[in-house]
Image (cartoon, coloured by chain):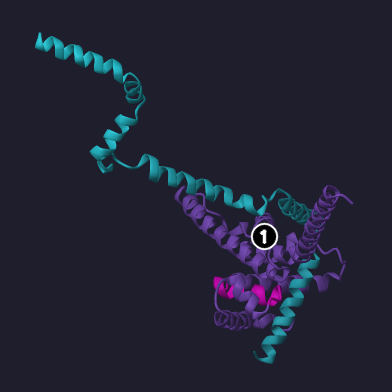
Amino acid sequence: MKRSDEEFARAAKARFDESVDKLDGATLSTLNQSRQKALAELHTQPTQWLRWVPAAAVATTAFLVVTVILPEPANIQPVPAEVADMEILLGEDSLEMLEDLEFYAWIDMLEQENDVG
Amino acid sequence: MSAESASFAVSWVSEESTGTRALQKEQQLNRFLAEVERRALRIAEIGVRDRDDALDLVQDAMIKLARNYSDRSSDEWTPLFYRILQNGVRDWHRRQAVRNRVMVWFGRGKRDDEEFDIVAAAPDPIGRAPDEELQNSEAMDSLEIAVQELPRRQREAFLLRTFEGLDVAGTAVAMGCSEGSVKTHYSRAIHSLRDKLREHDETV
């Protein structure tokens, strides 16, 4: 930069600084109030980990939507027959049937006798 | 000392050190804002030609800096603060442009005689001689008008480099551009202002 440009910049800065020094009391008071409001922000800031809470909530919601709500019935794979049989065998009713096995054998025997008779 | 009381003492010392750090940060930010706020106001005022709007913009910039960047190193605060402020000034101009279009549509555009009068708005508490005061006010008035007429990027480069005293790197951060662009805009601004203010060259 030329020397004359530097002198011009210095002179302009001097005029600017004078205008800054001339700011009235009401304006300075308003600036002070603004500064206090800004500093009060420091006390209302959430702690570091709390900043991630909204993001975590969104991620959890998205995960639930994708895994629970979105899957269509057509996309669900049919359960193999063997698995269905196991469910029936392991069901509560099946266990009761095993306990009364003698009773069912007796009914079966009566039915066979009737068929013969 | 039992393990429990030792644990309490460590926790208490840790909390006290966190509190001390927070207090130091608050004091540091207070000093920074107090040091920069008056120049920032005048720079914003030159940008928007309205003191009340400039005060609002400076307050917004202070709050955003405290909210979002108080954890950064204090060396970074000046360019970050001015970047926020310049963005605010840019948004203000966009809003004004929209508002003026709407007002013109309804036939209620701003009149030419409602322009901001910098001389009337700036009393002189220092008590200089009227002639000297008039000369200085006129010189600053002319300078402000010339700066306001510069293209936006040149104006930003000039205000930040000359009035705030930021270096090229800091100005580049504040303007969101390369250092080369800052040098170009600043050089053009200086030459343009010198041409415009040739008649005031001895006072400015």
Quick one: SS at disc 1? helix
Q: Neighbour class for label 1 at 10 Å: few (<14), some, many (≥20)?
A: many
- The foreground one among B110 and A65 is A65
Residue at left offset 63%, top offset 83%: B194
| Residue B191 located within the stretch drawn in magenta | no
**Picture quadrant of residue B140:** bottom right
Q: Which chain is purple?
A: B
Q: Is residue B156 left or right of residue B127?
A: left
Residue B40 x, y percent position in the rendering: 70, 65
| Residue B153 located within the stretch drawn in magenta | yes
Colour that chain A carries in the picture: cyan
Q: Is residue B96 left or right of residue B33?
A: left
- The foreground one among B184 and B11 is B11
For the stretch drawn in magenta, the main secondary structure is helix
Residue B111 x, y percent position in the rendering: 56, 56
Query: Visible in this render: residue B46?
Result: no
* Image quadrant containing the C terminus of chain B: bottom right
Q: Is residue B74 left or right of residue B183?
A: right
- The foreground one among B69 and B152 is B69
Residue at left offset 51%, top offset 52%: B99
Q: Is residue A82 left or right of residue A38?
A: left
Q: Residue furthest left?
A: A116
* Residue labelled with disc 1: B65
Residue at left offset 62%, top offset 56%: B114
**Picture quadrant of residue A97:** top left
- Chain holding disc 1: B
Residue A13 x, y percent position in the rendering: 73, 77
Residue A1 x, y percent position in the rendering: 64, 89
Q: Which residues are magenta?
A: B149-166
